Amino acid sequence: MRPLTKVLLAVLLLLLLSAVGGYFYARKKFEPPVNQLVVTKLPATCTFSWLADTSAGRITPHAALLVPVTLPGCPRTCYLQFDTGAPYSILYAKPMVALQRQYPAMRTAIQPATTSAQNVHFALGQGQVQAREMRVLPYGTAQLPDSATPFVIGTLGTDVLEGRALVLDYAHHRFTLSNVVPDSLARQAAFVPLSFKSRRLLVEAAIAGKDRQLLFDSGSSAFALLTSKSEWHKMAEPAAAVQTINVNSWGSTLTSYTTATAARLQLGGAALPLQTVTYIEGMSWWQQLLMQTSGMSGMLGNEPFAEQLVVFDVRGGRFGVVTK
């Protein structure tokens, strides 16, 4: 074998091994830990709130979707951001320490340097949630605001949905977690397949006649559809203005590019206008690899469903929308 051929084969083998190693690295990063939540006394219904954001120099009225919770020994209503992009729920250390300081009778004891908490209890509407263990991150505010301001103490992830059904009535700000979808509601909905692999909500939909698998991420509330730069160019309205914003993603600063689109989201018999489409720059190489290996071709936010009622039937493997 010629020396040049040997070198080329060695390079190809190295690239192949790197690709295989990268794939398994990405899959490992994509896998969530074992579900720690035990949810009882369902159905649980509550009224959710929107948290606005002005940090990017403009008002984003739907920056975060907040659900109210109550903790044992704490008379104050607190809030968790409901984020379907998070495969497990977490608490924020700073607000939890502030609550303990104000309400010493609180059962959940967290120190500033705590990285996890055991046997956490909280009420979600009529439902009761117990976590054998919850991860704690050094986020949030250490000052208690006035009672009219939502006090966010953590994130409620998709671990609360496993084996259950969720109805989000965006028009009336209603959050209902149950074991099954009521038949009366199911008859009204246009359903498409829903996958819950690795506790990610992957919706099978169509855009511009092309079938896609889209991650439903309620944490990306400011955007209708996040997609690749190449798809963004295909969907963008000619000569439409582009809005550039710096986005904070778990401590990292990314840059988003949003423009108008005439594309519609097709969900069975329902067609919803997207109105805008976005792509993001600044993701790390492993985040990009994660997207590629997961099979998803974009991320859906809350905006297309602002006046709709949506159904996440995780147990039944279907996603539905009831158009108003």
Image: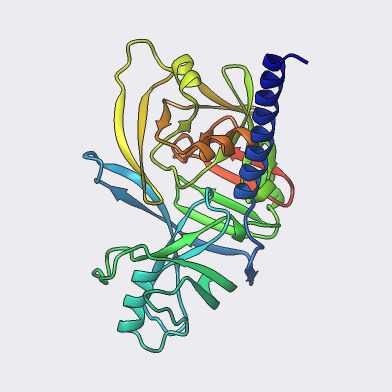
Looking at the image, residue 111 sits to the left or right of residue 186; the answer is: left
State the image coordinates of residue 323 (x, y, percent, origin top left).
55, 35
Query: In the image, what residue occupies the spot 58% across and 39% down?
Result: 290
Which quarter of the figure has residue 96?
bottom left
Q: Residue furthest left?
A: 57
- Residue 187 visible here: no
Looking at the image, residue 98 sits to the left or right of residue 70; the answer is: left
- Residue 134 visible here: yes
Looking at the image, residue 66 sits to the left or right of residue 272; the answer is: left
State the image coordinates of residue 214 (x, y, percent, origin top left).
59, 34
Looking at the image, residue 147 sits to the left or right of residue 34; the answer is: left
State the image coordinates of residue 130 (x, y, percent, origin top left).
59, 74
Which quarter of the figure has residue 265?
top right
Number of numbered tags placed on the structure image? 0
Colour logic:
rainbow
Query: In the image, what residue occupies the spot 21% across and 39% down?
Result: 57
Q: Residue furthest top?
A: 238
Query: In the image, what residue occupies the spot 32% across and 16% down?
Result: 240
Q: Check the image and report above or below for 138 versus 173.
A: below
186 or 219: which is nearer to us?
219
Q: Residue furthest bottom?
A: 105
State the image coordinates of residue 274 (x, y, percent, origin top left).
46, 27
Split into 4 quadrants, where in the image is the N terminus? Answer: top right
Q: Check the image and report above or below for 49 versus 299.
A: below
Query: In the image, what residue occupies the spot 36% across and 88% down?
Result: 104
